[in-house]
Structures are given as C-alpha cells and as structure tokens.
Amino acid sequence: MPVVVVDAVDVGPPELAEQLPVAAELLRVLPGPDRPDYALAALGSPLRWDAPDGPREVHALVLAPRFVGDRLAPDLRDLWVGLAYVVDLAQLRAPAVDLAMCHYAAVVRLNLDPTREHLG
C-alpha cells in the first residue's frame, strides 16, 4: 500500500498540528460499524498525544474520508479525512474497525507521497 503524508489539520488538537508533516503507510481498508471504507495506517515515527490520562505515543491511525463519495485512491491528493489514534494495538490485527480501540482526534489533509511505496 502507498505512503501518505498528513500535512494539515482542519480541526484537531494543537499538539498534532505542531508535529506535521508526518508519513504513514496505508496497510489495509477495513469496514467499520458505520461505513465500509476506513483505512488502517502505520506511522513512520510515533506521534505525541496529550491524552487526558497523560502523554502517550501513537504508532498507528485509522482514517476515513470526510465527505461521502471521497475515497483513498492511487491518485490521492488534498483529501480531507477523519483521523483517529489507535489506542489499542489489537486494532492492527482486527478484521474491522473497533471504535473502542481508537480515539477520534482530528480532521486532516492527506497527500500521496510519490517518492515512497513503503516506510523505512
């Protein structure tokens, strides 16, 4: 799967905006309780999250297009998506998005990173 770059925040916590841009490798598309087109992504480097119970590192994200009809496509450019932090790493193996394993954090802009097919 391709590498995308989160490069802007529309709505979200200030600490997220301060850490951009950040690269993430799209791992797979997952169904969720309310829609079929969530995407699981692994971060190239962890994000800092100022969680209510103290600072945490986030290593993976769940993404979903903000608007009906938008999708994560090979020609991805300036796509606004909802971003959730994966807070339980069991989500990485789960066959569907479990919202109890995620924390909705922001609306962000994604762009394809044409220079990389994989992180690392």
Image: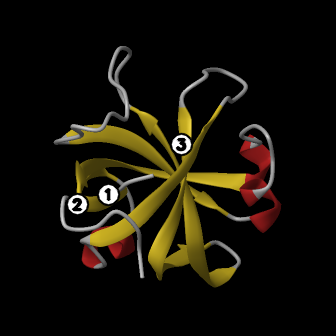
Residue 4's tag is 1
Evaluate if marks 2 and 1 touch, with contact meaning CB atoms under 8 Å apart. yes
Front tag of 3 and 2: 2
Cβ–Cβ below 8 Å for labels 3 and 1? no
- Amino acid at circle 1: Val
Residue 99 located left or right of residue 64: right
The answer to which image quadrant residue 89 occupies is bottom right
Q: Amino acid at mark 3?
A: Ala
Please give the residue where the numbered disc 3 appears in the rendered image.
Answer: 39
Note whether 102 is above or below 48 in the view shown. above
Q: CA distance from mark 2 to mark 1?
A: 5 Å
Mark 1 neighbour density, 10 Å: few (under 14) some (14–19) many (20 or more): many
CA gap between label 3 and label 2 equals: 16 Å
Say what secondary structure mark 2 lies in.
Answer: loop
Q: Residues within 10 Å of mark 3 (few under 14, many from 20)?
A: many
Amino acid carrying mark 2 in the image: Asp
Label 3: element kind: strand
First of labels 2, 1 by sequence position: 1
Residue at horizontal 34 percent and vertical 22 percent from the top: 67
